[in-house]
Every structure is written in C-alpha cells, then in structure tokens.
Image (tube, rainbow, N blue to C red):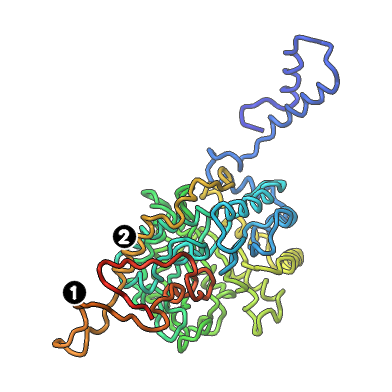
Amino acid sequence: MVRGSRPLGQTISKKFSDMRYSNISWPFLLLLCFVSMADAEYMKYKDPKQPINSRIRDLIGRMTLAEKIGQMTQIERQVASANVMKQYFIGSILSGGGSVPSPQASPAIWVNMVNEFQKGALSTRLGIPLIYGIDAVHGNNNVYNATLFPHNIGLGATRDPGLIKRIGEATALEVRATGIQYTFAPCIAVCRDPRWGRCYESYSEDHKVVQQMTDIILGLQGEIPVNHTKGVPYVAGKDKVAACAKHYVGDGGTHNGINENNTIIDEHGLLSIHMPPYYDSIIKGVATVMVSYSSLNGVKMHANHDLVTGYLKSKLHFRGFVISDWLGVDRITSPPGANYTYSVQAGINAGIDMVMVPYNYTDYINDLTSLVHKGVINISRIDDAVKRILRVKFTMGLFENPLADLSFAEQLGKKEHRELAREAVRKSLVLLKNGNSPDQQFLPLPKRARSILVAGSHASNLGYQCGGWSIQWMGDSGNITTVIQYPVQGQQFLMR
C-alpha cells in the first residue's frame, strides 16, 4: 500500500458512498473491487522515481528461485525464442561470433529479432527485460555494413585516449542501431608475450597504455557524473551501451603465450601489471567484467574465489555483474564438462553472476537449482548475483525503454564513423624501418612514381586486413562487410 493512502476496505466503502445510484449490478461492484485492488497494488520496482537500490530490493523480494536463476543465465540467440524467455525467465541473450539473424541482415532485421526475444521476457510474471550482448570489439563487427575500426593493438599505438573515446561513442551508436544494448568490450589484457595468438586484442604490453585506452568505456557508456560512487556501473542513456572489461585477470601473461594457459606470477607482478586497467575501468563505471579462461598460478580464474569475490568485488568494490566467458564454466574441469555440476558449483561460488551457457541452458538451470536446494550454494550468493544483474538493467533504463526501434538505424556505417576509422588507421601506423640506410630511405614515396606495386595475399583482401572478429569470430577472406573502395588521386595502385 502506498504511504498515506486509505486501506483497501475504506477505499471501496468510500467509492460506494460516493455513488449517486443505488441500483448498481453485482458485476459492476465486482469490477469496482478489482479496480480498487489494482489501485492499492504498487510495485516500487516499476517506479523510475525510486532509488535504484529500493527498486532492486522490491523486485528481488518478489522473485522465485526459478526467476532468479533465469536472470543468471545467458543463452545464444540460436536456441532462444520468446517462449524460451517466458518459460525459463532467461535474463540475457548473446550473439556469438558470426551468429546473425540472416546473412547481411539489415538494422530492421536485427531490431525485430531482439524485440521478439524482449517481448517474451516482458510477458513473464514480473516483466524483467533481457539484456542482449554481442562482441562489438572493433566496431559492431558481427554486423554487415558496420564501421570496422583498427584492432586494439593498433589503437594502442595511437597513444590517443580521446580518439579511443570517440571510437567508443561511434561503436555504441552502431550497436544500438541493431537494437542491442551490451558489448563484450573492451579487452584490457596486457599482452606480455607476442606468441599469444590474441595479442592483437591487447592495446599494449605496457599497462600504462592499456590504462589510458580504458577511456573507450566513457565512449561506450557515457561520461560518469561528478562524485559518482566508485564501482557502481553507469550507462548514460539510450544511445549508450553497457561495456565489459575482459578477461579478468592475467590472460595476456600466460606461460609461453599459450592461449587459455597458466599465468605464473607473484602478487606484486599481478597487481602492478595486469590489474591496473581494471582499477581504471571500475573507476570509469564499467557495467560488467568477464572472467578469463586462463589460470593464475594453477587456479582456473572461473573458479578463483579469492580474486573474483575477494579482490574484484570486495577490495575494488565492483558493483556491476561478473559474467563468464563462452562455456567458461565448463572449462573449469579438464576435459571441459567432465563434471558439469561441480563446475557450476565452483563457478557460482567463486562469484560469477551470469553464466554464458550458451546452448545447454536446461542442464545449467537444473544443476544450479539442485545445488541451491541442497544448500551447496547459499541463497545469499544467488541474491548477490541477481542484485548485480538488476542494478545494471535499472541503471541502463531497460525497465523504462525495453524495446528497440529504428531511430539509430542510420548510424550503422555512417560516413562520419568511417572517417573516424580512417583517422584511427592513419594514427595507428607504426614505421619499423625506413629502408636499408639513411641514404636509401623507402619513405616518403616519390611523388612522381608512375605506379606502385602492392603485393601479397593481404594486398587486396579486406577480410584479411580486418583480421579476427570481423563478421566471423575468426575473420574471413574477401569483401566481407562492404564493397571495397580505394581512393585513387592521380596515381595507379596495382593490387596483387
């Protein structure tokens, strides 16, 4: 009941006493009763004027265990439907690398797909909106005709945080053009060994450069307000998206650069090299943090309670939600999935709030439900996870604006964004060696050269030049995202 309002019985009696006619039918009285009950029912979590913490407490107090576990579940769009959303109360959907509604899908096709899933979520008893995630790691790179920016290794070479922030702003608009509200970016790994195959996803081997580049979060999510509480996520509005700092922590320092391997390092090295970009990301209001596949001194990060709960949540006061990587919980065991129930137990108890399943969501939901019923996972751990997820959703305004529209459609591949990408390319170029000697310099090129031969497999291959995470998660060959155009100004380029 709203403070200051009459009790339900008094409300009905007053309505009766105010009536001017006595020959009122019972159906009408019954209807009046229902209207009065509806007036008395006030759901605080639906009131945007209420403080976010109050809305969270009100909503979580209404939720069943099934609804809570549903919020902790992220599934791939290929297994999602409006009915699945409604039946399992799913909290999040993602598009994995290359997972699209149709080849060369338009913004309208993307928006309609996301909205269909969202309508399923909204049709549940409590109407909690879903959050849809995608790997927009150098532009909205899954999407045909989107603007692709240089990868992080190139952007780090620019040493230009302002440029990176503008790239974040453009990326947010192009993600919103498809109706999506969440990107799994930025990767803030500090690559310490160039043999690591994902070094191109790292801004630098120098953590100070990586820290500067976390300004992309301010572009993606918006400038945080003055006196904003450290650790609390912040997303400015409908033209912004939730960001994700990844992969926590030490993924760029694995032994011999082996992907998903073991990072062997002492506490000083961890805190001085790999952790600083997370300090900056949290200060800048990052909404989510993704856990690394890798291990730290033999302990899988997806099962590392000390670093996920003890350090990230308790020491750094991170208040957003922690998400697993793709099948990351499965990989707690070797081989992956060898004891899935144990993996769920270890991952959730370590502090993971949302699990990227992505396909076998019923196994995950059933196992997590059973573990809670058996007391292996405490309900307080579930509540902590759900509160964090709801905090991000409330902060983003998803409850007020759950459905997307086509108002941002023209932002996809926008001319200004492509000019920004060209600027980033120019600033990211690094000259390693200019000819054989100072007397035989290769650059600058002769202005009167009649023709220039550009040779090699990458010379006239847009897909190869774009690299990984470009339409497909491993990239592809050819004109993958748009018709390639070369500016020719009085000179001939022979592409081979």
* Residue in the picture at 49% in, 57% down: 175
Residue 31: quarter of image? top right
Residue 331: quarter of image? bottom right
Residue at the extreme right: 26
CA neighbours of label 1 inside 10 A, class few (<14), some (14 to 19), many (20+): few
- Badge 1 marks a residue whose secondary structure is loop
Residue topped by disc 1: 447
Instruction: Specify the amino acid type for callout 1.
Output: Lys
Residue nearest the viewer, comparing 369 with 198: 198
Relative to residue 71, is residue 468 drawn left or right? Answer: left
* Residue in the picture at 71% in, 27% down: 7
The answer to whether residue 379 of the structure is visible from this angle is: yes
Residue at the extreme left: 439
Residue 293 image point, x, y percent: 55, 77
Residue 384: quarter of image? bottom right
- Residue 444, compared with residue 96, is above or below; it is below
Mark-to-mark CA distance, 2 and 1 = 33 Å
Residue 261 image point, x, y percent: 52, 84
Residue 478 image point, x, y percent: 48, 74
Residue topped by disc 2: 162
Instruction: Specify the amino acid type for callout 2.
Output: Gly
* Residue in the picture at 43% in, 75% down: 461
* Residue in the picture at 52% in, 58% down: 182
- Badge 2 marks a residue whose secondary structure is helix
Residue 98 image point, x, y percent: 57, 68
The answer to whether residue 159 of the structure is visible from this angle is: no
| First reached walking from the N terminus: tag 2 or tag 1 | 2
